[in-house]
Image (spheres, rainbow, N blue to C red):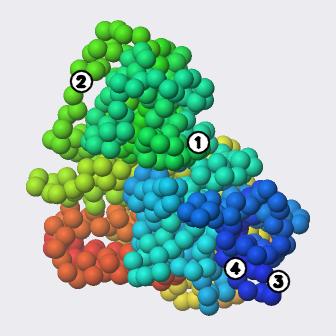
């Protein structure tokens, strides 16, 4: 969870009335509109929109036709307010249609009573809930919970930061439950909000344009309610009409609640494969999960897709039906996805596909174990690349996921598959980031970057800073990444692993003699790879390091160290476990300075335990 000093979501808004009373929260879209809940602005004609992170405020008007008040059954409750002026400092939030599969972690930034600058809260998606299943349930993670003052706040994905919906309500008891209105439902109530959605709709147009009244011989509602992960249903000819009807009935963009329709979100993605290649279908699936598309989408979709319910029509009309089945659809079923496959004409391929049976629990465990081995190999490659570049890797998860698949372990295979897929996505994202650092065209890694420089192909930051982070004193300055050495000449991160070398190298620091502090009395500032920045970098417009990225790097160091604990047989060591929990707690709930100290203390304790056992 980002800390309250994250500062990279300038579009997070606090909403006040003209008397100064806080009404709730919201998200600024495109610098021109405020998206929030209708009950937040109920009874007022205008509000004051404050952006604490961007440091600006602006008025917004409640416009006719742009507000859907809560209905008697609590559906609706969304509002889009035009701002009195464009707020360029707010940047632009990205709305995204993403399958809200169980277990996805999200964050929200709200303004409970007594918190002038706002607080972060983390949650985990639990599935469709609320009136007519329009909402998605949020289960609290950690001590900070979604409370009063979060209504209308953006709910964004931990993995990539895109907005998945807005907070609509919370439980008044101690359960920590809350709910969000997802982007699909917002778009159905307020079509004008779709202009800020940067992903394809979850349903291809052919499903809504064809007949949806046939196929009565097929009861898809029963199949969707009872069939386990890995199940495959094949529909041929006129039976495909039942698929179209089910897709339309379960889509949040349609008008839910029609008699006989399946539950909302019971089908995560509906793709028309007619004329499409396996790569194109794989790319479509990856887009629905929110994953960035790499060089090999077919391989990527196998490893990075969590279990989902996928409807694919026109399988026999695909560019290469055999390759689509063998390269994309069969591997998805083997990893727990449920597939409804439509064939336009009877054929041998349809018959063979219909005759396939799901592999069962043992087969799924074997598949997940193989994927976990692939993850461990990918993380080992990532560590080698990180040492070559001289930067810490991101969070490593293979060691922590391994016990779930050990013989006799009781585990939800869908949750396990989702965790492994999420870890594969994280490794690929980190590898892409480190590859950009290694192949940067600006010159050697030690060369300072000019102000405002970005690597080609990388997206601009949502918000750039003219001011750097506040300097630290004493040991905190060393932990924050400052080097002490003659003429700002630094050493790279030690290439021999996360626990080798002196403590000063834990985060890529070097100490030496004869250092001349800058005019503030602190060691000279370091760049993201441990390279020296010019003393006047503040005046030259250097960008502030991303606190969320640094927090992710610390998590990576913590996980890598935890993996060493397990590998060296210290998994049951109470003292090390206590240190680990303290570090994990600070990463989730404390500022970066305390988090650095806690992670470093855990790493020192592990190093001492390993060296003492040799």
Residue at the image point whose x is 15% and y is 54% from the top = 406
Residue at the image point whose x is 84% and y is 68% from the top = 61
Work out whether mark 4 precedes mark 3 in sequence or the reverse, and give the earlier one: 3
Q: Which residue is mark 4?
A: 23
Work out whether mark 1 precedes mark 4 in sequence or the reverse, and give the earlier one: 4
Mark 3 in CB contact with mark 2 (< 8 angstroms): no
Mark 1 in CB contact with mark 3 (< 8 angstroms): no
Q: Is residue 408 left or right of residue 584?
A: left
Q: Nearer the viewer, mark 1 or mark 3?
A: 1
Residue 265: tell me if it is visible.
no
Q: Helix or strand or loop: what does disc 4 sit on?
A: strand
Work out whether mark 1 precedes mark 3 in sequence or the reverse, and give the earlier one: 3
The answer for how far apart the CA atoms under marks 4 and 2 are is 56 Å
Where is residue 319 shown, x and y percent of the image?
49, 14
Q: Name the image quarter holding the C terminus.
A: bottom left
Q: Which residue is mark 3?
A: 18
The answer for how far apart the CA atoms under marks 1 and 3 are is 37 Å
Say few, some or many: other residues with alpha carbon within 10 Å of mark 1 (under 14 / 14 to 19 / 20 or more). Answer: some
Work out whether mark 4 precedes mark 2 in sequence or the reverse, and give the earlier one: 4
Residue at the image point whose x is 67% and y is 86% from the top = 116
Residue at the image point whose x is 38% and y is 17% from the top = 236
Q: Which residue is mark 1?
A: 254
The answer for how far apart the CA atoms under marks 3 and 2 are is 65 Å
Q: Helix or strand or loop: what does disc 3 sit on?
A: loop
Q: Is residue 160 left or right of residue 498?
A: right
Work out whether mark 1 precedes mark 2 in sequence or the reverse, and give the earlier one: 1
Q: Nearer the viewer, mark 1 or mark 2?
A: 1
Residue 6 against residue 117 in the figure, above or below: above
Q: Which residue is mark 2?
A: 356
Q: Helix or strand or loop: what does disc 1 sit on?
A: loop
Q: Foreground residue, 107 or 588?
A: 107
Where is residue 405 shown, x and y percent of the image?
19, 52
């Amino acid at each position: 969870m980002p800390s309250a000093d994250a500062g990279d979501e300038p579009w997070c808004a606090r909403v006040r009335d003209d008397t100064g009373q806080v009404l709730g929260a919201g998200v600024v879209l495109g610098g021109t509109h405020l998206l929030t809940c209708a009950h937040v602005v109920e009874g007022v004609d205008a509000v004051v929109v404050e952006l604490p992170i961007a440091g600006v405020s602006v008025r917004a008007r409640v416009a006719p036709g742009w507000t859907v008040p809560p209905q008697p059954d609590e559906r609706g409750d969304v509002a889009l307010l035009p701002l009195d002026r464009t707020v360029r400092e707010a940047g632009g939030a990205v709305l995204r249609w993403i399958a809200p599969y169980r277990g996805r972690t999200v964050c929200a930034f709200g303004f409970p009573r007594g918190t002038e600058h706002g607080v972060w809260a983390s949650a985990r998606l639990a599935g469709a809930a609320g009136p007519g299943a329009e909402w998605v349930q949020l289960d609290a993670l950690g001590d900070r919970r979604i409370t009063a003052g979060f209504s209308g706040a953006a709910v964004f994905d931990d993995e990539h930061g895109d907005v998945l919906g807005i907070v609509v309500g919370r439980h008044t008891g101690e359960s920590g439950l809350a709910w969000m209105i997802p982007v699909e439902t917002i778009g159905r109530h307020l079509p004008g909000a779709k202009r800020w959605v940067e992903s394809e709709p979850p349903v291809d147009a052919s499903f809504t344009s064809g007949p949806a009244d046939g196929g009565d011989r097929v009861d898809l509602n029963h199949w969707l309610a009872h069939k386990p992960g890995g199940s495959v249903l094949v529909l041929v000819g006129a039976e495909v009409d039942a698929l179209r009807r089910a897709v339309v009935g379960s889509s949040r963009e349609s008008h839910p609640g029609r008699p006989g329709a399946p539950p909302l979100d019971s089908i995560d993605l509906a793709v028309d494969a007619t004329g499409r290649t396996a790569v194109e279908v794989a790319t479509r699936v990856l887009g629905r999960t929110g994953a960035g598309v790499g060089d090999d989408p077919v391989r990527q979709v196998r490893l990075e897709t969590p279990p989902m319910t996928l409807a694919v029509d026109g399988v026999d009309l695909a560019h290469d039906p055999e390759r689509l089945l063998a390269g994309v659809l069969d591997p998805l079923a083997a990893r727990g996805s449920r597939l409804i496959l439509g064939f336009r004409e009877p054929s041998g391929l349809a018959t063979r596909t219909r005759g396939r049976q799901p592999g069962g629990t043992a087969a799924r465990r074997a598949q997940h174990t193989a994927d976990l081995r692939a993850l461990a190999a990918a993380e080992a490659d990532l560590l080698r690349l990180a040492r070559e570049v001289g930067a810490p890797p991101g969070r490593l998860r293979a060691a922590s996921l391994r016990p779930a698949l050990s013989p006799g372990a009781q585990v939800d295979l869908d949750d396990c598959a989702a965790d492994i897929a999420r870890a594969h996505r994280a490794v690929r994202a980190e590898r892409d980031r480190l590859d950009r650092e290694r192949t940067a065209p600006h010159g050697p890694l030690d060369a300072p970057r000019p102000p405002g420089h970005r690597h080609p192909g990388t997206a601009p930051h949502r918000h750039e800073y003219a001011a750097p982070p506040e300097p630290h004193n004493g040991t905190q300055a060393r932990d924050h990444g400052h080097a002490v050495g003659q003429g700002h000449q630094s050493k790279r991160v030690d290439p021999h692993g996360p626990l080798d070398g002196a403590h000063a190298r834990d985060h890529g620091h070097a100490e030496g003699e004869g250092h001349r502090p800058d005019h503030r009395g602190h060691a000279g500032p370091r760049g993201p790879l441990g390279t020296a920045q010019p003393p006047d970098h503040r005046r030259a417009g250097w960008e502030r390091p991303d606190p969320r990225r640094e927090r992710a790097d610390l998590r990576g160091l913590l996980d890598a160290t935890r993996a060493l604990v397990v590998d060296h047989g210290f998994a049951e060591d109470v003292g090390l476990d206590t240190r680990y929990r303290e570090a994990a707690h600070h990463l989730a709930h404390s500022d970066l300075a305390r988090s650095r100290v806690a992670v470093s203390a855990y790493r020192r304790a592990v190093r001492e335990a390993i060296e003492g056992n040799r």
